[in-house]
Image (tube, coloured by chain):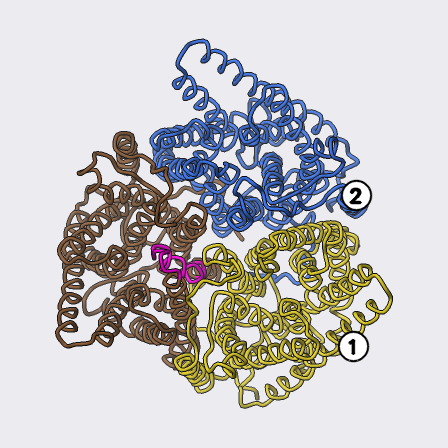
Chain colours: A blue, B brown, C yellow
Amino acid sequence: MAPQYAPSLRSRLAPLLLFLQIGFIFIYAFYIEIESHVKEDGITFSNFYAEFQDVNVMVILGFGFLCTFLVRYGFSGLGFNLLVAVMATQWAIILNGIESWYYRGMIKINLRSLVVAEMCSASALISIGAVLGKTNPVHLVLIALLEVSGFVLNEWLLQTLLKVQPLKSIMLLHIFGAFFGLTLTWILYRKGSEQQFEKEKFDRKTGLFSMLGTMFIWMFWPSFNSVLVDNHTPGRKLGAVFSTYLALAVSAVTAAAVSVLCSPKGKLNPIHMQSSILAGGVAVGVSMSVVHQPWEAMTIGFTAALVSTIGFRYLKIHMLLAFKCHDTCAVLSTHGLAGLLGWLAHLLLQIKDCDDHTTAIRFAVFHICTLFITISLSLSMGIITGLLLKWNFWRPPQDKKCFDDQAFWEFPQLAVHK
Amino acid sequence: MAPQYAPSLRSRLAPLLLFLQIGFIFIYAFYIEIESHVKEDGITFSNFYAEFQDVNVMVILGFGFLCTFLVRYGFSGLGFNLLVAVMATQWAIILNGIESWYYRGMIKINLRSLVVAEMCSASALISIGAVLGKTNPVHLVLIALLEVSGFVLNEWLLQTLLKVQPLKSIMLLHIFGAFFGLTLTWILYRKGSEQQFEKEKFDRKTGLFSMLGTMFIWMFWPSFNSVLVDNHTPGRKLGAVFSTYLALAVSAVTAAAVSVLCSPKGKLNPIHMQSSILAGGVAVGVSMSVVHQPWEAMTIGFTAALVSTIGFRYLKIHMLLAFKCHDTCAVLSTHGLAGLLGWLAHLLLQIKDCDDHTTAIRFAVFHICTLFITISLSLSMGIITGLLLKWNFWRPPQDKKCFDDQAFWEFPQLAVHK
Amino acid sequence: MAPQYAPSLRSRLAPLLLFLQIGFIFIYAFYIEIESHVKEDGITFSNFYAEFQDVNVMVILGFGFLCTFLVRYGFSGLGFNLLVAVMATQWAIILNGIESWYYRGMIKINLRSLVVAEMCSASALISIGAVLGKTNPVHLVLIALLEVSGFVLNEWLLQTLLKVQPLKSIMLLHIFGAFFGLTLTWILYRKGSEQQFEKEKFDRKTGLFSMLGTMFIWMFWPSFNSVLVDNHTPGRKLGAVFSTYLALAVSAVTAAAVSVLCSPKGKLNPIHMQSSILAGGVAVGVSMSVVHQPWEAMTIGFTAALVSTIGFRYLKIHMLLAFKCHDTCAVLSTHGLAGLLGWLAHLLLQIKDCDDHTTAIRFAVFHICTLFITISLSLSMGIITGLLLKWNFWRPPQDKKCFDDQAFWEFPQLAVHK
């Protein structure tokens, strides 16, 4: 008979966290220093800090509360998100500085490094959305570290092999994260979960908490997309802000319309309103550098919300039944499909701008390679991570304890009835 | 017998939203472009963006969560607020640019246009507060578009006929929105609603969500009032921030004191603490340009909270019973009365500053005309909109389905108990 | 027999608030004016305002929602926090300007004054954390005014007697607030409360609200610590941001690890994750001026979380049983111990930097005096305040009405069953 209690993580989680954290402190002590002088490119501290905070709010609070929709899994969603985000950010700062360490022996960090690291960490949080509730925090920390490593490797490959601009390669975080997460959840598939998990439910109040997270992500997405756009040509940064804002606005309207259309009773689905209103931000983020007109951004937002809402309605259940791939937060439709759409929009817009055929074809090949490398690496890293996590040493929760805070949290002073 | 289910909106909401959204995309494609060069008046991108985000947070998150206080209407309050806000903002950008389109054939938009558009949209959201719960999303979208049209028309009239400064005419948004909403709810009055609606209730948790919205509005109001104040004389912007902050602080204290005084048991009323603590921000916003001393702002905040709390206590029920005007979010006392008070404070302070009688009288006439035009237009637009919405074609929810998410949202995975 | 209802505050709270508020308005009318010209030290309005708002969010929303964890005390936690914060801020602006008033007859205020005043108010809010739920709003307002007076006096003594830098003396707010609050709760101890109060409980939803507050404090702490660091040497501000961010990140990981280690079942304690993840920010805030390397900040964060988590686990119950000191929000472990640790870290790091023994010893003596004065003043003010509050004139709630909103709030439209 299976044990009644979830396995204790005392001998797994605590040593792992302490070991990693002390290790990070040592690495930081020897190799990392703060770059104190002002950057020459006009980005001074004060006009960058507010945007950094917007990104920080999205990563810590936005993603965190987004994961509180499960009725019994709110503390885990929020708490593990924080834990994973700070581990991944510390690790990403180190990884992003390896090249500089190789040449100069030291890693110099500034506010920009921190923003880039938080974006790598956002990529890991997207992956985690796919396996949320079916894993324990030990798994999540390992996933985050491996995903970030894979993502930084991908960035480096793209920049070295294909001379992709840094910003473009970072914005692939949605595609990388989504496919990594999907592979992972496919490998970690639990038999019998075609039926819904017993506790995979939400109620009105947790739904509102989750909406809170969504709102913060929705509102600050213009900062997320524009923060790394350089300030040399002021119009570009404003353009990124406007494109993202308009795409998100159109996404919200379209998601509502399509959700009502798809429903036989003509009702809105709260999950559509939570995930698909964000699709425009993903798609514009990926294609940002070639979006010059407001209507282009709006059309991308429209299509992204359409694809994402329909994907959620018909694809999610298909993925589960046909491919045995249980995707808790629907990262496929929110980040995966919208990211691919953004990639496609980038291709089409760039080709439209090209004067002759040769350049267009050359760009298309280059652009397809970029996607190919990203997805291959994402799938391979997902498989490796998944196989590592299948090891019972990490003490996965039983099926009955999935989606349940009680497995990982103690509530000594809990009020009995409401 | 009345049907048991709320009427389906599939054939109304979805086509309306898609039609409007695709229409907006076409208009944007042909007539709107982003103004990329830096403004000459010293407002650069980076020191404006943080304040834009504060306003954005107020409009999307603040107003949204403010409307979640109804126990069964949280998703509608929050979701429809987002929907309406983005529709109204897109529409306001177009309307505000009509003049420029007329002369130059194109509408150039920048961050300032977006802020102005969000303020017009805030005006529509205030109106919606009065009819919340008794309408369906189709109604709300129509209300928003018509209200924004009326408000922009009012702005144009005031600026053309009376040479009112743009900022002053925008700040009348509270008065315009409140009276528009009140007229609307008076026309849409449902027989038998002298008794409370069955589901017009709140509980502790939804009250806290609503407090969250209030807090964000309270905290970021200094940004809302100061964002459009020009930066030529730095003191003015700081003055607007300080006036708003102090007025809000005094409002919070006064609302608590008056609430306790009005209650026979000496207890605080949570709704007072939610609506009346904001009254100072409204009143100072309207009178801002003549408030120069901290104590003036504080006195305005004090009076506004006093009027608003007493108005809420005694006027709301009177409005319902005597005038058959059911005002869900108490926009009369929060925005209407406080706005009028701000208008009066403006008059008095300006007259005090005048050197001679002639100027004072001239200003008074001019100031009274401003209010007269605003209220007339607001009432007329409210009547037109109300009559349009009375049409059964829009499928209003039955009385029993008012204040109920179930009428518009489907909850497939809702946890049964808990 | 004890009365069934909590005593009415109508004749206490309302007159007190109105008297104080009108008094403040008079003082502001005669002695306070806004400093309009731009500061010479490069801090202009726009690049300071965003950071001010971060601090404002921490004080109003962060501390407010942090106090909503009690299942029946959410409205009080949030509402009284707002009330107290605005009273304390208005009072602190006056007190901080007394010197300027003495010499020039007027108090000139700018955005910096407001930030400093909000920090003084944060100090009062920390104290209030220790007595939360066992006091009524009249008590809380008195505590806030006396605490702020004591804190400003302490600042003035340190700056006058020991020539401590203003920023350093402000950052002692955690130590001052925590010990003031502990003394207070020790004096106000209620017999029989070794057993838990009947209503001192939390549930999942209020826990999430409370996490929301924690998250905002966690995210914006870098702004809190860096906002007053001057901009002359840009690296210093960035250094303060980085130190705080890294210390908080390490704190979050360490708190989770230690919480799991301390628990026999290997589970996380949600209260640890709420309070101890903030310990790093406290400790770094106190020692900030001598922390130059990332690893120093990280080590401080690590130790602070360790001390704070262990302190919470074993000291809180000990304080209650042995010292009869009931500390609702665990301010001892979060602010007290972490603050002392920061003080110690400051001492050690400064001594390490000293070249010769004489300077080191001189600094140590000076540093110990600073702490000694702060704690003495904090304890004395706590005793005075406690004795004043013991007076039954203020109508304290009965034991049964502790931790209950019903004692202070009326809920006319409350939904009966959820």
Label 2 is placed on what type of residue?
A: Phe
Q: Position of residue C74 (x, y in %)?
A: 52, 66
SS at mark 1 in the image: helix
Chain letter belonging to callout 2: A
Residue A30 is tagged as 2
Image quadrant in which you'd find residue A164 = top right
Label 1 is placed on what type of residue?
A: Ala
Range drawn in magenta: B215-234
* Residue named by callout 1: C322
Q: Is residue B60 above or below residue A364?
A: below
Q: Position of residue C122 (x, y in %)?
A: 58, 69
Q: Is residue A205 above or below residue A297?
A: below
Chain letter belonging to callout 1: C
Q: Position of residue B28 (x, y in %)?
A: 29, 33
**Local crowd at mark 1 within 10 Å, few (<14), some, or many (≥20)?**
few
Q: Nearer the viewer, residue C232 or C288?
A: C232
* 1 and 2 marks in contact (CB < 8 Å): no
Q: Quadrant of the N terminus of chain C?
A: bottom right
Q: Is residue B221 magenta?
A: yes
